[in-house]
Amino acid sequence: MNLDQQDLELIQNRFRVVCERIEAALQRANRRSGDARLVVVTKMQSTEVIQAVVEAGAQRLGENYAEEAIEKMPAFAEHKGLEWHMIGHIQSRKSGLVVQNFDYIHSLDSVRLAERINRQAAEMGKRIPVLVECNSGGEESKFGFPAWQEEQWQALVPEFEKILALPHLEVKGLMAMAPYFDVAELARPHFRKIRKLRDALANWLPGGCWDELSMGMSGDFEVAIEEGATWVRIGQGILGARPLLAR
Ligand SMILES: *Cc1c(COP(=O)(O)O)cnc(C)c1O
């Protein structure tokens, strides 16, 4: 596919508009400018499309599949400071690729995976920032530690203690994906729940850092920011519909 000038401008305009909407949502919530950062989700998108948004100023790209992302990375080797964020479920046999090639993991969804990543990071002499993924809606299609009912939360403490003890992981906070709703407002209770869980964890596990909340996507990021998101992950709202690349 060849991007024409019009496609390129459309992507770059949408990027700027989303950045403005992030700032406006922070203001509405009486939060400081820059307190919520954008990960542009580039899964299934071509390097041309990604190039357009990087030129517009995107600094962090989110991908769901390690191998797909690794194929794209060389095209951006010259962009110093560009970060690659893993946001999708990590199969255990792909975890080494993730540790080697990504800057940040949003989707740490089991203690086993945490232990594996810790071991691999140790071998590579790295320490990798991670967010612990929680399932706020109880949907079977979603990964993450079970957190849809408050009664489940206490049981997470011993699990998260094991993760906090791993020296090559730098736990930063939580990640969640609200269920899909046509109306963004309906996602608000999910974001509020995750923030409340974060506050509980900060209390129960004060030795850990729980500052970051990665929540909010194209359809609901403003609500997520109003409820405390520090990372939003936005794909289609900037890059347009994802083409169905064969993979
Ligand atoms: C695809 C994806 C997104 C972005 O979704 P959009 O609707 O394109 O904004 C965000 N987070 C995760 C985990 C995703 O898989």
Image (spheres, helix red, strand yellow):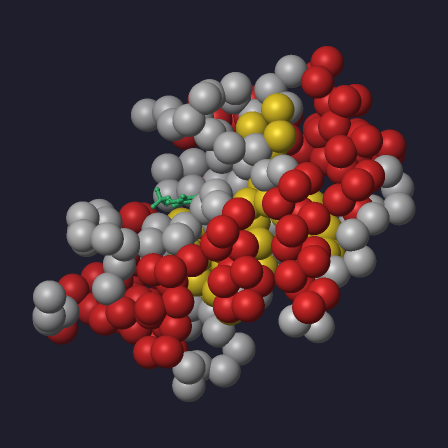
Quadrant including the N terminus: bottom left
Q: Give 48 or 155, whichever is nearer the viewer.
A: 155
Residue placed at 63% from the left, 38% from the top? Answer: 110
Coordinates of residue 91 in the picture (x, y in percent): 48, 46
- Taking the image as four quarters, which one is ligand 1 found in? top left
Coordinates of residue 144 in the picture (x, y in percent): 57, 33
- The count of marks equals 0
Q: Is residue 204 above or below residue 246?
A: above
Q: Give 247 or 242, whichever is nearer the viewer.
A: 247
In this rendering, would 65 be left or right of 159? left
Coordinates of residue 48 in the picture (x, y in percent): 23, 71
Look at the image and tell me whether residue 185 can be seen: no
Q: Is residue 204 above or below residue 93?
A: above
Look at the image and tell me whether residue 109 can be seen: yes
Q: Give 101 or 207, whichever is nearer the viewer.
A: 101
Q: Give 114 or 155, whichever is nearer the viewer.
A: 114
- For residue 126, what is the image quadrant? bottom right
Residue placed at 83% from the left, 48% from the top? Answer: 165
Q: Is residue 158 above or below residue 189?
A: below
Residue found at the very far bottom of the displayed protein: 78
Residue placed at 27% from the left, 69% from the top? Answer: 47
Residue placed at 48% from the left, 54% from the top? Answer: 94
Coordinates of residue 75 in the picture (x, y in percent): 33, 78
In this rendering, would 231 be left or right of 221? right
In this rendering, would 79 be left or right of 136? left
In this rendering, would 62 be left or right of 214? left
